[in-house]
Amino acid sequence: MAKGRDKHQARKQELSLFGKDLVRRCGAQCEMCGDSGVPLSIFEIPPVPNEPDFDRCAMFCDTCQEQIDFPKRRDNDHWRCLNGAIWSEVAIVKALAVAMLGKIAAKEEWAVDLQDQVYLQAGEQELIDQISPELK
Ligand SMILES: [Zn+2]
């Protein structure tokens, strides 16, 4: 059986196949906060499937990735970017944005207000329901 580190490397290599298309899709901007001129890397939106899936990947900056993974480092003001991200045309980014908004809304009044603006299309709630329990 492959060791953890080897597994991690293998996964990275598999994901790198998506790199070109993701770079094109994101237009050199973080797909969550819209930041440009910062390093972006592939983020797999949880629950992470066994096989890498392009439709569950996004290009995010380090700040977004860190704050998604580590709630204790979360700066709620950073997440005002959800104002834009909840309108993303990329289904998985939109779903993650709405799921994150649910987390932030537990603490911030502006996030509760923003929740009123969320407009979901058919099938999107299902995706959000998959992601929400995975977020800390
Ligand atoms: Zn970002």
Image (cartoon, grey):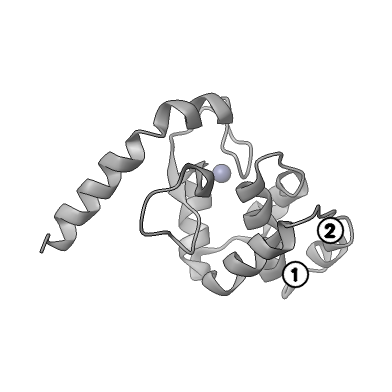
| Horizontal and vertical percent position of residue 124 | 72, 57
Q: Secondary structure at mark 2?
A: helix
Residue 45 versus residue 111: which sits nearer the camera?
45
What separation in Å lies between label 2 and label 1 (alpha carbons)? Answer: 9 Å
Q: Amino acid at mark 2?
A: Leu
Q: Amino acid at mark 1?
A: Ala
| Horizontal and vertical percent position of residue 43 | 45, 48
Q: How many residues crowd around disc 2 within 10 Å: few (fewer than 14), some, or many (20 or more)?
A: some
Residue appearing at x 51%, y 49% in the figure: 56
Tell me which corner region of the image, top left, top right, bottom left or bottom right, holds residue 18.
Answer: top left
Q: Quadrant of ligand 1?
A: top right
Q: Are marks 2 and 1 in contact (CB under 8 Å)?
A: yes
Image mark for residue 46: none
Query: Within 8 Å of ligand 1, the CB of disc 2?
Result: no
The answer to whether any part of residue 136 appears in the image is no
| Horizontal and vertical percent position of residue 20 | 43, 26
Q: Which residue is mark 1?
A: 105
Task: Say whether residue 66 is left or right of residue 87.
Answer: left
Query: Within 8 Å of ligand 1, the CB of disc 1?
Result: no
Quarter of the image that includes the N terminus: bottom left
Tell me which corner region of the image, top left, top right, bottom left or bottom right, holds residue 16.
Answer: top left
Residue appearing at x 79%, y 63% in the figure: 111
Q: Secondary structure at mark 1?
A: helix
Q: Which residue is mark 2?
A: 114
Q: Earlier in the sequence, mark 2 or mark 1?
A: 1
Height in image: 132 above or below 22?
below
Height in image: 106 above or below 112?
below
Residue appearing at x 57%, y 74% in the figure: 133
Q: How many residues crowd around disc 1 within 10 Å: few (fewer than 14), some, or many (20 or more)?
A: some
Residue appearing at x 81%, y 52% in the figure: 121
| Horizontal and vertical percent position of residue 76 | 65, 61
